[in-house]
Amino acid sequence: MIRAISTNACKQILHDIVIPKAVQQRPISVTCICLARDEANERVVRDARKGIEYKPADAETSKRYLASKAYRETYGDDVVWKHYRRNFRGHIAPETRLTCVRKGFISTGNACPVCRDQYLCLSFENRDLLQQFLDPMTGECLPSKVTGLCQQQHKRLMFEVAKAQDYGYLEKYFPLRKYNYSEYYRMAGLTKEMLDAEAEEMMN
């Protein structure tokens, strides 16, 4: 069996075992099967062991991706986090991890719905993607325990949603509150006719 070893190791073996001491004084050229390792290749190997490099797309590319055939084949008509499942012990879901990306590489085998798909960019311009993480009744961001986003992406989501509301890309919901002032009117000795007359005077 031929084993690939480094060039320095081959030279050392030839100097110690194969080549006699009388020949060791001459320069030799090693012509055996070696694993050529320069600095660039070693850097690539080390990076490959860290995981997948995280290079998220920009907002315009992400918007085109949401309208593409590849997105429909991957997610269909569902939101991007619907079929995502977290791995945890017990019945109560803990808080999501702090981040899925460390030093520019995805450091986990089960990244969150946004980190695992690098074409999903949380940006205030990407209105269609932001709406998938909003409650349709209140317009607020869904909790990270529901969507499965890591804490870093969840904080970015809240920031981009607030920015989109300020720029007018998303509607801002205000709770509708109705108050019953009848008890206050009764205690103040006011009647509906008196209030209507006072309102007409203010209008005039």
Image (spheres, rainbow, N blue to C red):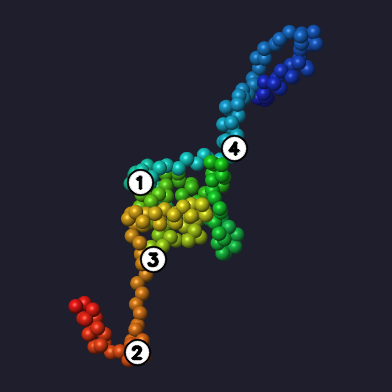
Dot 2 or dot 1: first in sequence order is: 1
User: Which of the pair 77/58 is nearer the observer?
Assistant: 58
The image quarter containing residue 139 is bottom left
| Labels 4 and 1: the sequence-earlier one | 4
Residue bearing the label numbered 2? 188
Q: Position of residue 172 (x, y in %)?
A: 35, 62
The crowding category of the residue bearing disc 3, from other C-alpha atoms within 10 Å (few below 14, some 14 to 19, many at least 20), is few
Crowd around label 1: few <14 · some 14–19 · many ≥20 (10 Å): many
Q: Which residue is denoted by mark 3 in the rendering?
A: 138
* CA distance separating discs 4 and 1: 32 Å
The residue that disc 4 covers is: 49
Q: Secondary structure at mark 4?
A: helix
Give the residue type at disc 1: Lys
Lower sequence index among marks 4 and 2: 4
Query: What is the CA distance from the residue labelled 4 to the residue labelled 2?
Result: 76 Å
In whole angstroms, how far apart are the C-alphas of marks 1 and 3? Answer: 25 Å
Q: Mark 3: which secondary structure?
A: loop
Give percent across and percent down for residue 163.
39, 54
Residue 169 makes an appearance in the image = yes
Q: Earlier in the sequence, mark 2 or mark 3?
A: 3
Q: Nearer the viewer, mark 4 or mark 1?
A: 1
Q: Amino acid at mark 4?
A: Arg
Quadrant housing residue 140: bottom left
Compared with 198, 118 (above or below) is: above
Q: Residue at x 42, y 42 (%)?
A: 57
- Mark 2 and mark 3 in contact? Answer it, CB < 8 Å: no
The type of residue carrying mark 3 is Thr
Which residue in the protein does label 1 denote? 63
* Comparing labels 2 and 3, the label whose residue is closer to the camera: 2
- What separation in Å lies between label 3 and label 4 (alpha carbons)? 44 Å
Q: Nearer the viewer, residue 36 or 199?
A: 199
Q: Earlier in the sequence, mark 3 or mark 4?
A: 4
